[in-house]
Every structure is written in C-alpha cells, then in structure tokens.
Image (cartoon, helix red, strand yellow):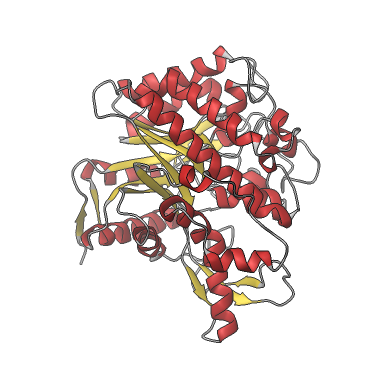
C-alpha cells in the first residue's frame, strides 16, 4: 500500500549542474583557458576521448534550458560560475561578456521564481593560475578571494544562495593524488597543502561576502546566504577486524572529517594529521588560518550518492585502505545503490553543525537510450530518486533541518573523466545535435515537485 510523503512548505526541489560540464563555448567571448580545458585536450585523459568544448552548449541554449526548468516546476537551480569566463587570467581585467552571461541567466531564473543557488568554484581553475602553482601556491587562495569579491559585488544581491566550493575532497584527491581529474597531478605528498589552501580560500571568500553583504539584499527576499558544498559519504568497515575498523576510521577522516572539523571546530582531525605526518605529508597552517576557515557560514550543502566500504590494504602506502564492493545493486559507474546514505550523511553533518542542510547532489548514472518510440525510459533512475527522497523525508521526520534536495543532474553532460559515457540527467542530451529530450524521470520529478512530496 503506497504512502504519501509530504515535505515542509517552501522545500527547495532543484536540479544541479556545473559550468565545465554543460556550458561549452570554451574559448568564446573572451573566456580564458581552464585546467579542465587543458586536461580534456590531453590525449588519454578522458575515457571516450570527448571534451567539454561543446558539452551541452548551454552557453548558447540557456534560455531553452530555463524553459525546461520552468516546465518541470523547479524551485531552485544550482549551477557554477566558470572563474576563467570572468577573469581569463585568474586575476586582473574583468571579462564583461562572461559576467553578462551569468547576469542574464540569474535574471531569467529570478523572473520565473526559480531560486539561483550559485557555486563559485566547481574545479575549473584558470590555467594561468595553475601555471603559477595552482592550489599548491598559497597565493591562489587570495586570487580566489578577489574573484569572489568581484562576483559578490556585481551579482550578490540577485542570488539568495552562494557556495564557495564544490567538493574540495574530490578536487584534492582526484585532481592532485590520483590524477584522473584536472589538473592531472599524481603527488599525494601535497594533499594537505592543496586542501588547506582550498579551505583558506573559502574562509577568505566568506570574509569578502560579509563585507559586500553588509549593503546588499535580494530583490524580494531575505539577505543572501553563503555556505560550502562537501562530499559527505558514510563509511563502513568491511569487517569488525581491528585493522579494517582503523582503515575505515582513516577513510572517513580523510574524506569527511578533514573538511568538517576545520570548518566547524577550527582544527584539523588529529588522527588524520598524525597518519599523514608519518608519511611526510603536512598542512602548511599559518597563524590565523583556522580562524578564517571556521568563520560562521549560513548553510551546508551535502553531495552524497552511496556509501563506501573500507578494508585495510598494506599495499596502499598513503592511505592503508582500499574500497570493496557492497552487497547491493550498482549503477553504471559501479556505485552501490544504498538509499540510507542520505540519512547517514545528514547525521554526519549534524554532528558538526545545526545549520540548515541541503542535499545539493544525488542521482544515478545510467546508460540511457532513446527508444524507437522516442521515449527515454529510465525506470531505474525513478526508483533511485524515489527511494532516496523517501529517506530524505525520513530525516526531516527525525528532526533534521533539511531545506532542499537537488537531483544530479538537470541534463546529461560531460561527466568529467568518463566523458559522455555516463548519463545522470533528467533531460537526455543528444550530443550530436544538442537536442534535449525529457526522460520519464523528468516527468516523474515534475509530479513530485507539484505534490511537494511523493507516493512511496
């Protein structure tokens, strides 16, 4: 027997994207080169050999995409600004044409009652700054603060929700240790340096936001708010063996606590620092840094898709861990489908802060195809979203202050090192023509939004 699960009034039903993954127009209208432009153009880096040069061509088709959002009934749209589209060299002269693109998009969203939720950095560092050391260079944090201050000054009053960074953990580990993301570095000895400078830039940007927000207000609502979006995934040990339990504790520490503790407690987790110090990896913390990093914010965004099961691995000299498959079914990437991840991730965050929380990314990778009848039947995605949204409702019933849920993604896009092989979208993208097609999940999600809940 189905049960109707209603969400609180004003709950933000949204969808999310990122600039490099959808915009295209990679060298148009004065945009500078990003590290993802350089990385994707390097042979052998992307599984299918594609790039984000065109992606979904959102830069030229944004009005069409906003129309899809309106038809779907979205309450909020989460997207990122491409830093090199605003400051082609990372600092210095403003590219007005780049700023105008985002201004037009934000104005259209506000006009249609769709709340813009804007991320300043979703991994596309200007290549000019990478050439000067990138995030390993402390100076990059200050260049980020200048960029953030410029954006807040020009667009701040029009955007109710701002996030400084998206998933610094992923950018640190995949971009600088594993090397399967831009800038493609494989230097785990700089992990804490990179992570610390990202967090420092967050603190500096929050400081800039407070300075600008003191004389800014939204068009028809409360003052703009600022937060950060973290990858918060629950970690489970592969067994009760002490080595597996210790390995799991470190994995949770490196992914979750390494960012939560400095942000909300003004310190790095001692056990994680000790583990890295034994391997010669240290954070370059200077006096006053942690006070900046832990400055109060207004909300926390959580990206979560599954759980991670960790096992001790003596062959991994840096982490001493490896991940093992879970018992459940998996998506096209191989991630276990595990709906309790929503509640578990929210509880992890709640242990550190009482701030309002948002699920800023959650979704399923599939190999979607257009049927002979023109329909994209993604029943597996509907089941995934239904089950995860039901757990989000359960979390609210348990007293967790969850304010919104964003599906990853609005439309099929350039999925980082997977290229165009993995599809997460509610809208199907024909990459040959850039045509959008509503999947069954998009129709289903429209009904969820209209009902402000679901039948489960």
Q: Nearer the viewer, residue 362 or 259?
A: 259
Query: Residue 42 placed where, x, y %?
Result: 79, 39
- Against 196, is 390 above or below? below
Q: Nearer the viewer, residue 261 or 241?
A: 261
Count of numbered circles on the image:
0
Q: Nearer the viewer, residue 317 or 159?
A: 317
Residue at x-position 57% and y-position 43%: 198
Farthest residue toward the bottom?
A: 241
Farthest residue toward the front?
A: 287
In the image, taking residue 188 as reference, residue 311 lies left or right, namely left
Query: Residue 26 placed where, x, y %?
Result: 65, 25
In the image, taking residue 114 as reference, residue 94 lies left or right, namely right
Can residue 119 be seen at all in this image of the molecule?
A: no
Query: Residue 35 placed where, x, y %?
Result: 69, 35
Tell me the quarter of the image containing the C terminus.
bottom left
Image quadrant in which you'd find residue 243: bottom right
Q: Nearer the viewer, residue 263 or 51?
A: 263
Can residue 10 be seen at all in this image of the molecule?
A: yes
In the image, taking residue 33 as reference, residue 272 lies left or right, namely left
Residue at x-position 58% and y-position 72%: 325
Farthest residue toward the top?
A: 96
Residue at x-position 53% and y-position 30%: 145
Residue at x-position 48% and y-position 50%: 230
Tell me the quarter of the image containing the N terminus.
bottom left
Query: Residue 344 placed where, x, y %?
Result: 38, 65
Image quadrant in which you'd find residue 92: top right
């Amino acid at each position: 027997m189905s049960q109707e699960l209603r969400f609180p009034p004003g709950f933000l039903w949204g969808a999310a994207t990122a600039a490099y993954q959808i915009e295209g127009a990679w060298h148009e209208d004065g945009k500078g080169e990003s590290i993802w432009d350089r990385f994707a153009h390097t042979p052998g880096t992307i599984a299918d050999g594609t790039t984000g040069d065109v992606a979904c061509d959102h830069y030229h088709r944004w009005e069409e995409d906003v129309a899809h959002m309106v038809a779907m009934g979205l309450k909020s749209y989460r997207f990122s600004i491409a830093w090199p589209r605003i400051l082609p060299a990372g600092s210095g002269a403003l590219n007005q044409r780049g700023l105008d693109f985002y201004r037009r998009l934000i104005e259209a969203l506000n006009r249609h009652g769709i709340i813009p939720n804007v991320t300043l950095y979703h991994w596309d560092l200007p290549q000019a700054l990478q050439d000067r050391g990138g995030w390993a260079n402390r100076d990059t944090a200050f260049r980020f603060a200048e960029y953030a201050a410029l954006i807040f000054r020009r667009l701040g009053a029009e955007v109710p929700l701002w996030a400084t960074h998206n998933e610094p953990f992923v950018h640190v580990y995949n971009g600088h240790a594993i090397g399967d993301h831009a800038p493609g570095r494989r230097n785990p000895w700089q992990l804490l340096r990179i992570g610390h400078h990202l967090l420092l830039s967050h603190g500096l940007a929050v400081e800039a936001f407070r300075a600008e927000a003191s004389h800014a207000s939204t068009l028809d609502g409360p003052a703009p708010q600022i937060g950060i979006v973290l990858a918060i995934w629950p970690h489970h040990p592969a067994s009760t063996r002490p080595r597996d339990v210790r390995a799991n504790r470190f994995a949770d520490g490196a992914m979750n606590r390494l960012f939560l503790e400095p942000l909300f407690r003004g310190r790095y987790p001692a056990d994680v620092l000790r583990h890295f110090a034994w391997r010669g990896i240290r954070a370059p913390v200077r006096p006053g840094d942690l006070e900046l990093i832990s400055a109060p914010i207004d909300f926390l965004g959580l990206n979560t898709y599954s759980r991670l099961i960790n096992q001790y691995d003596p062959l991994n000299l840096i982490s001493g861990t490896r991940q093992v498959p879970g018992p459940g079914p998996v998506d096209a990437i191989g991630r276990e489908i595990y709906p309790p991840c929503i509640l578990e991730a929210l509880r992890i965050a709640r242990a550190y802060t009482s701030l309002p929380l948002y699920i800023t990314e959650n979704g399923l990778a599939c190999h979607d195809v257009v049927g002979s009848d023109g329909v994209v039947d993604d029943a597996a995605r509907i089941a995934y979203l239904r089950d995860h949204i039901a757990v989000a409702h359960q979390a609210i019933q348990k007293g967790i202050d969850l304010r919104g849920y964003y599906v990853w993604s609005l439309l099929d896009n350039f999925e980082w090192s997977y290229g165009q092989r993995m599809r997460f979208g509610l809208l199907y993208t024909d990459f040959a023509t850039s045509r959008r097609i509503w999947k069954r999940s998009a129709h289903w999600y429209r009904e969820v939004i209209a009902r402000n809940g679901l039948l489960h």
